[in-house]
Amino acid sequence: MKRIGKKIEGLNYKKREATYAIIERKEDKKIAIASANGYFFLFGGGIEQGENEIEALKREMLEETRLYHSKHPIF
């Protein structure tokens, strides 16, 4: 499994299915990404039991950006 950062001994790492998005504004082609502590991340996260990839991405986008998915044609 590809990992970013240092492995912390004593933690149990496991593979988790996930979904991520890149948001592009059509008018100026700027891309929105998440940023924290000097690192950059795509919006998204783990797929919960019973969700498909699109449902999980809608939920994650709402949680992380507060953007309502019906405004975006991909959904």
Image (tube, rainbow, N blue to C red):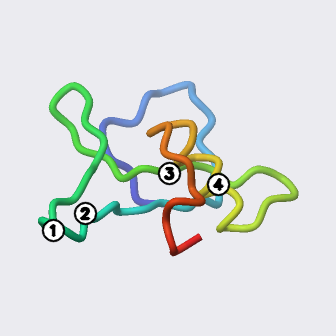
- The quadrant of the rendering that contains the C terminus is bottom right
Q: Are marks 2 and 1 in contact (CB under 8 Å)?
A: yes
SS of the residue at dot 2? loop
Q: Give the CA distance from mark 3 to mark 2.
A: 18 Å
Of callouts 4 and 2, the N-terminal one: 4
| Amino acid type, mark 4 | Arg
Q: Which residue is mark 4?
A: 16
Splitting the image into 4 quarters, where does residue 51 fall?
Answer: bottom right
- Classed neighbour count for the residue bearing mark 2: other residues with Cα under 10 Å, few (<14), some (14–19), many (≥20): few
Image location of residue 67, percent across then percent down: 48, 45
Q: Give the CA distance from mark 2 to mark 1.
A: 5 Å
Image location of residue 61, percent across then percent down: 52, 48
Of callouts 1 and 4, the N-terminal one: 4
Residue at image location 65% in from the left, 67% down from the top: 54
Residue at image location 40% in from the left, 59% down from the top: 2
Numbered circle sitting on residue 44: 3
SS of the residue at dot 3? strand
| Amino acid type, mark 1 | Lys
Q: Give the CA distance from mark 3 to mark 4.
A: 13 Å
Residue at image location 30% in from the left, 41% down from the top: 34
Splitting the image into 4 quarters, where does residue 36 fall?
Answer: top left
Of callouts 3 and 4, the N-terminal one: 4
| Amino acid type, mark 2 | Arg
Q: Which residue is mark 1?
A: 29
Count of residue discs = 4
